[in-house]
Amino acid sequence: MSNLGPLLSLHGVSKSFPGVKALVNVDFTARAGEVHALMGENGAGKSTLIKVLTGVYRRDSGEMLLEGKSIDPRSPQEAQALGISTVYQEVNLIPFLSVAENICLGRQPTRFGCIRWKAIHERALKALARVGIDIDVSEPLSSYSIAIQQLVAIARALDISAKLLILDEPTSSLDAHEVETLFRVIRKLKVEGLGIIFVTHFLDQVYAVSDRITVLRNGKLVGEYEAAALPRLQLISRMMGKELAEFEMQNAKGRPAPRDAFLELRGVGRRGSLQPIDLSIRAGEVVGLAGLLGAGRTETARLIFGIDQPDSGELRVEDRSTRIDSPRSAISHRLGFCPEDRKSEGIIPNLSVRENIVLALQSSEGWIRYVSRERQHQLADQFIRGLNIVTPGPEQPVRLLSGGNQQKVILARWLASHPRLLLLDEPTRGIDVGAKLEIEKLMVRLTGEGMAILFISSDVEETVRNSSRVVVLRDRRKVAELSGDEISEGNIMRAIAATQTEDTSR
Amino acid sequence: MNAPHFIASPDWKRLQWPLAALALVLVFNLFCTPGFFRIEFKDGRFYGSLLDILNRGTPVALAALGMTLVIATGGVDLSVGAVMAITGSIAALLITKGGASVPLVIAGSLLAAAGAGFWNGVLVGMFRISPIVATLILMVSGRGIAQLLNGGQIITFENRAFQFISRGTLLGLPFTIALTLAVFAVLSFLKRRTALGLFIEATGDNEVASRYSGINTRAVKLLVYAVCSLCAGIAGLILVTDIKAADANNAGLWLELDAILATVIGGTALQGGRFYLFGSLLGAVLIQTLTTTILTRGVPVEFTLIVKALVIVIVCLLQSEAFRRIVLRR
Amino acid sequence: MNLRALQRNIPFLATAIVCLLLYLAGCLRYRGFTSPGVLINFFGDNSFLGIAAIGMTFVILSGGIDLSVGGMVGLVSVAFALLIEKSHFHPAVAIPVILLGGILFGAGMGFVIHVFGLPPFLVTLAGMFLARGLAYFLKLESIPISHFLDAITRTVRLPMGSLELPATALIFLATFALAFAVAHFTTFGRNIYALGGNEQSAVLMGLPIGRTKIAVYAVSGFCSALAGIVYCFYTFSGNPSAGMGLELDAIAAVVIGGTLLSGGVGYMAGTLIGVLIFGIIQTGLSFEGTLSSWWTRIAIGLLLLLFILLQKLIQAKKFRTAKTFQTAV
């Protein structure tokens, strides 16, 4: 820890966009020689804060001081010139060029306009030594693992300017060993007096390397804490905005009557995205998949739906071992999937509401058996009314609908095809309360009719209310499975918070 | 006009600019070209400048219809002209050396055209090669293949039945026009009465979401390239029967560019998504009318190239968001 | 040379091997192939293709494409011929004027591409139409150029033993040397590689993307103009139909030379070898006598296909062996 004055301090910083208050009156300080973790769930304002710091956005109000001097960076280059460097999750370098060139790109030493390659080579070696790695800098960047590429990005950032280093979700793509290497580098830089801001959602890592933690929620500052003094459960409750005392809302459902599993995952995993997991989903039940952002919930859904392929384990549908190697294959097994990212993976923006709704149904019918216009209009009207989709009419291009209504259209698309298992990834995000309840009632009706549902939601309360079983994920692994009376917000949060040795199940 | 119910009434609002441009050119001709609108009826056939334009424009129109489907999926087919040459060469070969009957000639050459399209479709859909590059290959080598088939010469032939394609009349109108309208009707039918229209538009608008919804986007892409080349093949037959010769070097030269232009004028965006078959027809008619008008004024044909260049730029600028932002701000 | 460096440069090596094989095949089949004069002609006869291909290499490396090259050659050859014959400009004045025109034309296209975000394919297509149309507009048939050029081309030759390198080949090789230097030893050149490698990252890294993009098309315009002038040297005439399809040949030479069409990867030397392959194929065909030019088209098409598939194969392999990462957000 350091005893220097604040390196960077923000006071009362706010930033709004049309219709959204991304940051409201946020204070934040970073000190030299210290690692400060920035945490928060979806919509907390983490990335907005970082973008304000690095000049991508300009703040609406508030003060930003670097080493006591007021700053107002208007571009990443300006921020960099001030000494604030950022390394992003997707390493923003040029993969085909050599490591040495990537480090020096844009600032190559030249003589009479001619690049001095030897000088570049030496400079790169020096920069890399600072982060403690020794590699062949003449090899192209892409020939190295993401972990090494990240260290090169850090080396470049430090070579340009070196007061404050921001690491934006650096460990999402690293395995345990590589994370350790990164942390070694971070600790080394810390000792050298660098200020480091570490944005992440991996709990274990936060405690492994940070000195202080700032939690944001819904654009507001929740608090700043010393890492050593904040128990994990408290951290989680701060992030979710729930107090321990409130955790007694139990699941009202009784134990489900045992029925045959419709879908079973046995040891299914994929290197880099999900550790091998066992999961079974029975007809007529809602299985909730709980966990923090980045825990592996969407990854699980993608593996089930055939978008990604597992490299271990066995998938069984109706007690028969099978391979689902594409969404078409999944659909033929009577699966449906409402993706989290509805804009790029869900809606067909320029097509009408009616066409979007009919799409999955039509594709399973084939191209010759055209679903008649009357039937299409019937379906569209049915779902527009049933799900309360706000639209001037069924022919409205979907991109003109609000986010919540777009979500309903996608939901309608899958409902129209009558799947046996429906995977819902954040189906209620951005939907008003009334509609949320309607969807919950819908889920009850569907499961009553025998449909199985995998329900992914960041809203723990919602998960508790709707699920007959809850599987808890953390850091890409399954850590607990709760059923019947065990399902409660408290138990879920405790399962997430438990350290590795306390894991209750696999 | 009461169009058959499977051909949707065109979106007249979207077509207002091309229609206005066409009207402008026609009005210009009304005043400056004597006898432009005169139509005669002789020996069971109509004659006149207007009909000439439509007749000459049929190869572009056919190519544009096929190109529209390809562009709708977010791709492009540069090999259309080369396919026309290949089709013509095979037809000429089958007639002169093979001595085949006319239906067989037509079937054989169109089969080859469809095969070329299938080739393009495999490269784009299966190997995921960029459409510009994939169709470039056939564009570069296609005419070479056509010349190979011709033995390096221009093959001529005489076959009244075969020549009906470009010389014949149906209900007094040139057969070529009927042929083009028939293709238009078939494609419209496929678009509106089968799911193909939906699949193509969805694939072009958001391929990922389409795939997640169960559409076989690979098959869709394969299909559109095959159909595009088939349309080009039909155009190739028109060209070869028009001059009664297979000219591998010049048949359909640069026609792909006209086809792309016609499609874009007709309202189909280059990025893909919604497509407008009638718009592409209109675009082809506009291009042909413009070309003919320029020629009859005695301006050398080269000038049309400059005009086309300007049209491309204007259309794209209008489609460009950045341009609209800069211009509207003033 | 270590194994990794070899592995990295598979496209380039493949090109070099194919070139070598073709040459050897030619030498085995035709007795005249091994004569040094033939070798020199590879460079001399294809000089304007080579120069155009060099400009095209820069554009493709940056992730773009330039279809206006052929049209430019036609326009430039006519303009040059007119300047010299009708307006009686001295070549020393006419040449810089033409080259400047080429630079401005290219920069204009680059400007439209960058500022308005229009696809390079379309903008340069329009450029091609414009240039070709202007060429025909200026003059419909070809214009013979008088002894002026004759004198120049006769004096500007490099004696090499009993042979001479013609001016056209010299210009080609000089352009290549210059391009090589720019690509590997200037920040401009490296920025082009960065731009083609990953435009988003290049922007975030603070590189001057706008300037680089416009400049790259200006360079291509310069090369097209130079190619047009060399065409005049070669044919002693200006012809508005010159360079028909040249852009496709140039693209083919660049791709065959190992440069990825998506940009960011490739070598100038690769393009040189690509042009050589062109030359070998055409010379071989002329030696064969009975076959005609269409075989060149087919051969080029096949080679193009081969190399594109090879590029795809390498990319697919890289993708599969690298870790793939999915995240929840």
Image (cartoon, grey):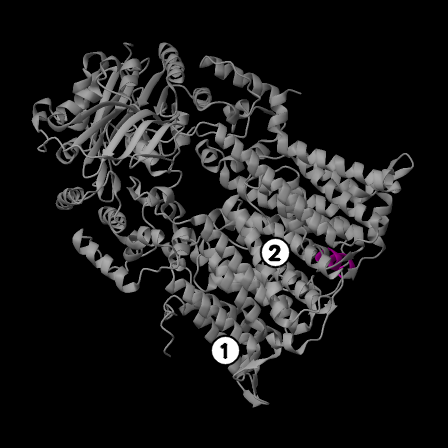
Tell me the element at label 1.
Answer: helix
Tell me the element at label 2.
Answer: helix
The subunit letter for the residue under badge 1 reads B
- Taking the view exactly as shown, the residue that stands out farthest to the right is C162
Q: Residue C86 carries which label?
A: none
In this picture, which residue range is highlighted in magenta?
Answer: C79-87
Label 1 neighbour load within 10 Å: few <14, some 14-19, many 20+ = many
At 76% across and 39% down in the image, what residue appears?
C22
> Which residue is nearer to you in this view: A94 or A276?
A276
Residue under numbered circle 1:
B26
Q: In this view, does B240 lie to the left or right of A76?
A: right
Residue under numbered circle 2:
C128
At 68% across and 34% down in the image, what residue appears?
C269
Mark 2 to mark 1 CA distance (whole Å): 28 Å
> x%, y% of residue B267?
43, 62
> x%, y% of residue A364?
34, 51
Name the residue type under label 1. Answer: Leu
> x%, y% of residue A359?
32, 53
C83 in relation to C92, above or below = below
At 70% across and 54% down in the image, what residue appears?
C243
> Which residue is nearer to you in this view: B318 or A177?
A177
A488 in relation to B124, above or below = above
Q: How many marks?
A: 2
